[in-house]
Image: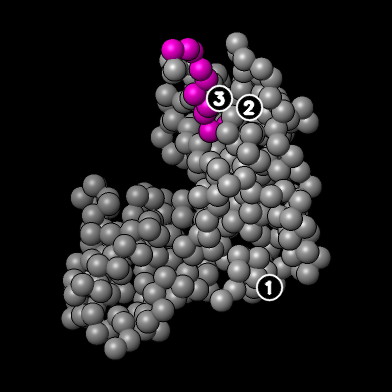
Amino acid sequence: MMNRDQMIEQYLQSQNITQELIKEVAEFRNQYELDPMVEERCTAPEVPFYGTDILEMAITALLRGQNLLLSGAKATGKNVLCETLAWIFGRPAYDISFHVNTDSASLIGTDTFKNNEVQLRKGPVYQCAQFGGFGIMDEINMAKNDAVAVLHATLDHRRRIDVPGYERITLHPATRFIGTMNYGYAGTRELNEALVSRFMVIDMPPLDEETLLILLNQHFGDLKKEAAEQFAGLFLDLQKKAYSGEIGTKSLDLRGLIGAIQTMRSGLKPLRAVQMGIVNKSFDIFEKEIIADVAKTRIPSEWSKGQIFEV
């Protein structure tokens, strides 16, 4: 049975990553040992990211001490890439979700009363700095000014955090931050120039048929070829309509498609499963009709479990 390092090397080789980069990543893991206190935060993704060019850009930037910003439309694999990068570098991952209530205290920490004294309850950015983690800043373009201001000194060459009332902390040398952002979500806004300048930016390309088929076969090893092609085609059809503005992006949901296929294992009719996982995620009656028509052209109503999985 392969150990973690062998699994990572095999994965990187399968993605045609250069041997030089594979060696540098291994040296990074050996140089910065994982603290046992946060070992449970460093786990292999259920399905690793697929895409040589994007992986090479991301790995190179992180090795050189840069932070990353992953921009792109919905369902382009941004979060999967974040999980994969934390795994191959052997670092604990800290999920930092930005929303209307995210402020500096929720990022760094807040005062709490413990053992008859006031102590700092450390937030995810503080812990990330302490243990050399990879901080995954989800939907960073929803961040309020208060939260963004905290990040400036953390993300630039100073690599430090001033904690009001406590000490100044310097980031662990292995600490990196990876921001993700979707276009056009409600509540999002343009990132200011000062924040963007602290990242190397990767524009995530939309999924293509080859990548979709690989992802589906990784999730479902016994998926029949014809079924996999139709499910991939369904997603690509919806992706085309979403990008052209015919429908919204609610139904452009790879997680929903995978969830639908999982329910088919229990005998649910494929078309009904797709209704639950894809069609019904649109709440506009006219849009739902368009999506349902696309699904019917791809998934025959007479299909059953036998047409989806190998016996």
Image quarter for residue 309? Answer: bottom left
Q: Which residue is mark 3?
A: 108
Would residue 9 be visible to someone looking at this image? yes
Would residue 293 be visible to someone looking at this image? no
Secondary structure state at the residue bearing disc 1? helix
- Looking at the rendered image, the quarter that the C terminus falls into is bottom left
**How much space separates mark 1 and mark 3, taking CA atoms?**
38 Å
Say if the magenta span includes residue 124.
Answer: yes
Residue segment shown in magenta: 116-125
- In the image, which disc is placed on residue 151? 2
- The picture places residue 14, in percent across and down from the top left corner, at 64, 74
Q: Earlier in the sequence, mark 1 or mark 3?
A: 1
Q: Earlier in the sequence, mark 3 or mark 2?
A: 3
In front: 105, or 240?
105
Asked whether the residues under the numbered discs 1 and 3 touch, taking CB atoms below 8 Å apart as contact, a structural biologist would say no
Q: Which residue is mark 1?
A: 13
CA neighbours of label 3 inside 10 A, class few (<14), some (14 to 19), many (20+): many
Q: Is residue 153 above or below residue 263?
A: above
Secondary structure state at the residue bearing disc 3? helix
Image quarter for residue 233? Answer: bottom left
Asked whether the residues under the numbered discs 3 and 2 touch, taking CB atoms below 8 Å apart as contact, a structural biologist would say no
